[in-house]
Structures are given as C-alpha cells and as structure tokens.
C-alpha cells in the first residue's frame, strides 16, 4: 500500500467556460470563447449546464470523496466589460465556495482559465500590456470577496498554451495564426499579469497560498542523434524554462531570448523592472501534466526546427518504457515522465511545493473506463515515486471532474470521472470515479 502525506489534497478540476453554460445569465459579459468558431463546430453555450446545476454537482463531488475542487472564476461574469463589477457573479461564486466548505472541500481557485472578456480583446487583449493591469484589478476584487474563505489560488492557467494555440496555431480563441511576435508578447504579458496579481495578493495581506499553473512538459530526444538532444533542450526552453526561469529566477533564459530575437526582432515589450514583478515570490507551483514531448530535429522547419513525435518507447530516468500506448486524443501515456518532471522541478527550482493541478486522459468509454482506471493508478504510483525522492507534492487534482467542452475539440473528447449525457444532462459516475473515490478516502494507493 502506498500512503500519501498527511493533509494531501485529493481533488478534481474544471474550468468555468468548459462546464458552466448560461452565457447570458446574471449579467455575464461576452468572452473571447463565446464567439470563437472551433474546428469541431461545438460551442460552450450549454456545456454541462453547471451554472444552474452546481448544487447537484457539489453533491457529486462528495460522492467522489475529494477534499479539494479546482475550478475557475469567469472574469466576464465578475467584470462583464473588463471594468464594471457585476455583483451577481460574485454572489454566484460565493454560494459555490460556501457549499464546498460546508462539505469539507477546499476550493482551489484559478483566476484565469482562458475566458478573457471580449471587451478587453477589443483593446488588444493579451497583446496589450494594460490587460495585465486589468487582470490585477480583477484578482484584487476576487481576494477581497473570497480571500476570507479560499486558501488556494492560481493566477494563470497554462500561459504557453494560450500563446501557442491562440496566436501560433489559431486553434484557440482569439484565433491568430503564425503570429510569433504576438505569441511571445502574450507570454510576457501573461507572466506580468501573474506577477502583478501575486503582488496584489501580498499587498492585501490575503491569508492563503498563490502560484502559477503552467503545463511543464518533460522533454526527451527521439534518438541518440545529438541534433535531437539539441532540439529537446531548445524546446524545453520554449515550453518550460521561459516561464519557470522568469517566475523562479527572475530572468528569461538566454538561449530563448536569442532564439526569439532571431525570429521576431528586439523584445522591446519587456520593460525594466518587469522581471522583478514576474518573480514576486509564490507559495507553490501548479503543474498540469499530460504527456512528455519526444523531440526530433527538423532543420529548416519554421519558426521552430523540430517535430514532436509519438514514440514507440521513451527512455526516462527510471529506464526504458517500451510499447507506449496513447489516449484517444493521440497523447502518449508515460507515467514515469511525471516522476521525471516533478524531480526536475524540485531540483531546478529550489524545492518549490507542487500541486498537480491537472492530469487526465481522453477515453470514450461511457461508464466502464478501465483504461482511465489504469491511467490514474499508474500516474499516482509515479507521483508517489517522486514523493519518495523528496519532492514536496501537496496534492493531485484529476482532469476532469465531468466530461466537458474540450475547447477546440468540443464535446467528442471525454476526460471526466463522471459521464455527462449532453442531451439530458444526466451525470453518471464512471468506474474511474469510484476507483478514485476509494483512493481519495484512504489517501493511499
Ligand atoms: C489543459 C487545459 C484544460 C483541459 C485539459 C485537457 O490544457 O488546461 O482546460 O482542456 O488540457
């Protein structure tokens, strides 16, 4: 039996736009996702109808045995046009938070999970430096409203994905393609927003912990060819070090500065003093982990001379994992890479306490989802290995609580521990949900 530390948080995760629906309720303003046409054609108008069904969903959280629930606050519900406060939005989340606390469930609150108010997008969105200041104001109002009850705060969810899919690939709102300058500008402003929100948290004397929630991916070369090792290192700079070095060391990595300058010219949106703001001390790091990146050199490919391949095997620190399976989204399943990334974060960033804020997989099975059961078991065993190696892991939040609106991929991609019938909105706990409840209740695997 593998036991987890006293006070370990066992949670499930969601985000507002992916589950809430009710996009016009209680004075909510438009977000950039409301009008974004996804490739799947699916929209978030109804999603899991959670904005109306939340009391039932809180009872389901009890059935899942969790002592933590990670969710996000929809900025456009609280500030419909980015500036004007909407009390009904605050009242809604206040009720949800109270209901969670009454049931012994810690709210873990994400401030930005991608639903920027459309009004701010019209002023340039994250390319506009002022959006970082608007975010800090929004965060401050959230601390004032909920800081007496919420102890776990996360600033920005996956800043790298916001830039990559929203500005380079056009797959996420706001849907720009091939805009590397936009991408790197947005990275910087998201980090600045994070830092300003951390500073505001300290200034307000809020009692609790705050951190960033990026998705650090462990990188491996596809072969012994030194060119693959080189791009594995380079891509690690792009995905991981750009964000983590900024937050924890107060500097952007030199190799990445050079690389960006070659592609977009001078990075003059970085102003004196910004990195001090960005590196304002945080209390913990949220880690969204799905899969490793196995890297192959692709000289001449632009803007980045590499390719991410789906490997047949991966050489992790623990040894060679052959016959790598993938989820139905084509994501390789490599639990040992979770151990590697946790150990690496611990070593490179001064033993920062870590909360796994997301980890999960797409499998379509309606209720008997044996593959998800195995996924959870193997990833928790990998997490336990990291604990044994001295990594300070505070908890684990499975993505996701419910099947939900999976952004560009729509409703076809099911990540939930709970099945949602989108016709009737009926919820059914999957086998994985029952399995997870057992682990959460025992705090042992
Ligand atoms: C992460 C997102 C989350 C969800 C999962 C599958 O990138 O943070 O909202 O879409 O992937």
Image: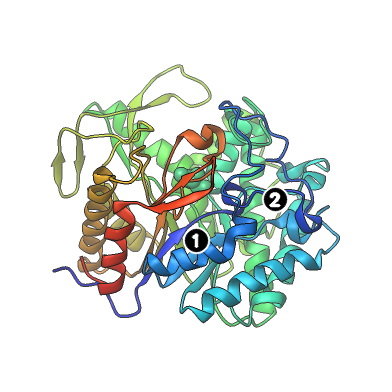
Label 2 crowding class (10 Å Cα cut-off): few <14, some 14-19, many 20+?
some
Quadrant of the drawing holding the C terminus:
bottom left
Query: Along the horizontal axis of the image, is 199 left or right of 337?
Result: right
Say which residue appears at 70% left-offset and 50% top-offset.
22
Q: In the image, residue 334 lies at what x, y percent?
A: 25, 43
Residue occupied by mark 1: 249
* Cα distance between the residues tagged 2 and 1: 41 Å
385 with respect to 360 (left or right): left
| Residue 151 at x, y percent in the picture | 54, 77
Residue located at (48% from left, 40% from top)? 238
Q: Quadrant of residue 145?
A: bottom right
Q: Secondary structure at mark 1?
A: helix
The dot on residue 22 is 2
Query: Is 249 in front, or is 386?
Result: 386
User: Can see residue 132?
Assistant: no
Mark 2 residue element: loop
Q: How is the image coloured?
A: rainbow
């Amino acid at each position: 039996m593998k036991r987890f530390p006293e006070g370990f948080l066992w949670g499930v995760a969601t985000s507002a736009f992916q589950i809430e629906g009710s996009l016009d309720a209680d004075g909510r303003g438009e977000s950039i996702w409301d009008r974004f046409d996804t490739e799947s054609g699916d929209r978030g108008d109804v999603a899991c109808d959670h904005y109306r069904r939340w009391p039932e969903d809180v009872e389901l959280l009890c059935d899942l045995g969790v002592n933590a629930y990670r969710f996000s606050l929809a900025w456009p519900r609280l500030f419909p046009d980015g500036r004007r406060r909407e009390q009904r939005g605050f009242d809604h989340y206040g009720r949800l938070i109270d209901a969670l606390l009454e049931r012994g469930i810690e709210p873990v609150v994400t401030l930005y999970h991608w639903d920027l108010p459309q009004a701010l997008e019209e002023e340039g969105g994250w390319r506009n430096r002022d959006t970082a200041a608007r975010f800090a104001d929004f965060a401050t109002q959230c601390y004032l409203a909920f800081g007496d009850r919420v102890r776990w705060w996360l600033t920005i969810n996956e800043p790298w994905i916001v830039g990559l899919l929203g500005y380079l690939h056009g797959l996420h709102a706001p849907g720009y393609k091939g805009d590397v300058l936009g991408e790197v500008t947005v990275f910087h402003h998201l980090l600045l927003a994070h830092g300003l929100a951390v500073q505001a948290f300290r200034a307000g004397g809020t009692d609790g912990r705050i951190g960033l929630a990026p998705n650090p991916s462990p990188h491996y070369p596809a072969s012994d060819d030194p060119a693959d090792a080189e791009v594995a290192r380079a891509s690690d700079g792009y995905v991981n070090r750009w964000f983590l070095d900024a937050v924890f060391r107060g500097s952007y990595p030199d190799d990445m500065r050079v690389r960006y300058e070659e592609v977009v010219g001078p990075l003059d949106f970085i102003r004196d003093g910004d990195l001090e703001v960005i590196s304002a001390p945080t209390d913990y790091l949220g880690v969204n982990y799905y899969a490793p990146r196995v890297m192959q050199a692709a000289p001449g490919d632009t803007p980045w001379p590499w390719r991410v391949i789906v490997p047949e095997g991966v050489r992790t620190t623990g040894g060679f994992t052959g016959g790598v399976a993938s989820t139905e989204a084509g994501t390789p399943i490599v639990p040992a890479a979770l151990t590697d990334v946790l150990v690496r974060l611990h070593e490179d960033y001064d033993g920062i306490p870590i909360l796994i804020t997301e980890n999960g997989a797409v499998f379509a099975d309606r209720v008997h989802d044996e593959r998800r059961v195995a996924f959870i078991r193997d990833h928790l065993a990998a997490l336990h290995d990291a604990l044994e190696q001295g990594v300070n892991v505070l908890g684990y939040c499975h993505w996701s609580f419910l099947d939900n609106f999976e952004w560009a991929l729509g409703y076809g991609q099911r990540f939930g521990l709970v099945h949602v019938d989108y016709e009737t909105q009926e919820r059914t706990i999957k086998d994985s949900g029952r399995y997870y409840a057992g682990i959460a209740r025992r705090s042992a695997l």
